[in-house]
Amino acid sequence: MFEQTFKNIDDILHKDAGCSSELDYVEQTSWVLFLKYLDDLEKDKRTAAELTGKTYTSIIAPEYQWNVWAVPKNKEGKLDHHRALTGDDLKDFVDHKLFPYLKKFKTDAASADTIEYKIGEIFTELKNRIQSGYNLREVINRIDELRFRTHAEKHEMSHLYEDKIKNMGNAGRNGGEYYTPRPLIKTIVKVVAPKIGDKIYDGAAGSAGFLCEAFDYLNDKKNLSTSQTEILQKTTFYGKEKKSLAYIIGIMNMILHGVEAPNIVHTNTLAENLADIQEKDRYDVVLANPPFGGKERAEVQQNFPIKTGETASLFLQHFIKILKAGGKAGVIIKNTFLSNTDNASISLRKLLLENCNLHTVLDLPGGTFTGAGVKTVVLFFEKGAPTQKVWFYQLNLERNLGKTNSLNEKDLSEFVALQKTFADSENSWTVDVKKVDTKLYDLSCKNPNRKEETILRSPEEILREIEMLDEETNAILNQIRELV
């Protein structure tokens, strides 16, 4: 039922003049979904308070509660069409009363780690783009069909929301910006193996996939105590995100996974000067997929000892600095980082090898990131001791990855098994850092155990080359004719 509801909402938004893409569909679904979630959360809190003889005070004032403005019900429990706003009346109420009211929560909240603050921050960043009040009425009616009361309902909802983020990533020009393949994230979390009590951080949070999967990984431990559950809710997961839409989606994604007031801050991580990071600011675990190929301005580069315009390289410096001694990391980066010969890349590889134990490099095939044709590697490292040996694993699949044939956990099972003992195989090998050239610190993946295969070109490639050769021949002949 939930899946059909989401499809129906997309169909409604597709007809609306204010929503032109999958990105708009997710954004607009998110704010309505959030208010419905908040209503169900308040119902649960009220019930829990009543069971213990306490009085529950609602977060939202009566006139702005879901069952008053969005779906007032009659005695039969059905939508009361006489009281329900629609058309211009509904749009005016949402734009000029509801949103301004919810925005004020940010300044009125006691602290940034409260649900009240998150309400204010979300509605400060968002605006209602649904232009037709009649379409908005239909969307509200559909979302009212959804329930967030049981664990199973929340679990199903979180999976459907993840699917929407995945589709949004596929629709955008840079799929990796919004969506890192979940089998890859799960594998990274498994290898890094965070513990309850660790502070886990993603400074390029995006849709918060790493934080959500880390929460699921730790939350699945059996017989969690009340204090452990509270630690997971309040002092475990931290993120920063620069872009408004990704920030909103990240907050919503974590809430649907079960984190009530996510510690995600809307800020540019790279605007922070590395020299200002103190021990109290550090984390036990870093999990991240910083943006590929971004370019940062000169004033941002001044915050870093190794100056470079490459966003991912600045993020890697940030992650190394913000890790505690003994802290662990799993970071996705373009595979060219291992071999680039510019001064910044060489200096950064030297920094990584001298300050951290880069124990594992996972080399991923092209097509891992749908819509982003870059090859990537995952760097697994621990801060505090220099690298002695690096274990490489090259993921070689017998199929091409793409939208309809994406990476799955089974693809990565051999990597997980071999990584435990750093075993050599046809796909894995170990490099002694003493043998690495200290002029370039080149760490490029050259598998010594895999036999070189003859790569046969496709008929299309051969035809293209024939056409190019024909063009070159004709150009030469024309020149000869002109000379004659």
Image (cartoon, rainbow, N blue to C red):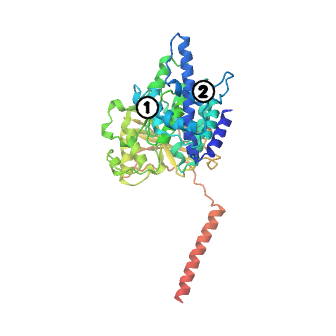
Foreground residue among 89 and 41: 89
Q: Is residue 378 in sight in this rendering? A: yes
Residue 435, x across and y down, in percent: 41, 47
The residue tagged with tag 1: helix, strand or loop?
Answer: loop
Instruction: Tell me the quadrant of the picture where the C terminus can be found.
Output: bottom right
Marks 2 and 1: which is nearer the front? 1
Instruction: Name the residue carrying label 1.
Output: 104
Q: Earlier in the sequence, mark 2 or mark 1?
A: 1
The residue tagged with tag 2: helix, strand or loop?
Answer: loop
Q: In the rendered view, would you say 239 is above or below 438? A: above
Three-letter amino acid code at the position of disc 2: Phe
Q: Is residue 190 in sight in this rendering? A: no
Residue 152, x across and y down, in percent: 63, 26
The residue carrying pointer 2 sits among few (fewer than 14), some (14 to 19) or many (20 or more) residues within 10 Å by Cα, namely: some
Foreground residue among 36 and 275: 36
Residue 366, x across and y down, in percent: 56, 50
- The quadrant in which residue 138 appears is top right
Residue 456, x across and y down, in percent: 63, 59
Three-letter amino acid code at the position of disc 1: Lys
Residue at the farthest bottom position: 484
Give the CA distance from mark 2 to mark 1.
25 Å
Foreground residue among 24 and 357: 24
Please tell me the numbered disc located at residue 347.
Answer: none
Residue at the farthest top position: 53
Residue at the image position 64 percent from the left and 25 percent from the top? 73
Instruction: Tell me the quadrant of the picture where the N terminus can be found.
Output: top right
Contact, CB < 8 Å: mark 2 with mark 1? no
Please tell me the numbered disc located at residue 148.
Answer: 2
Foreground residue among 434 and 31: 31
The residue carrying pointer 1 sits among few (fewer than 14), some (14 to 19) or many (20 or more) residues within 10 Å by Cα, namely: some
Q: In the rendered view, would you say 356 is above or below 69? A: below
Count of picture labels: 2
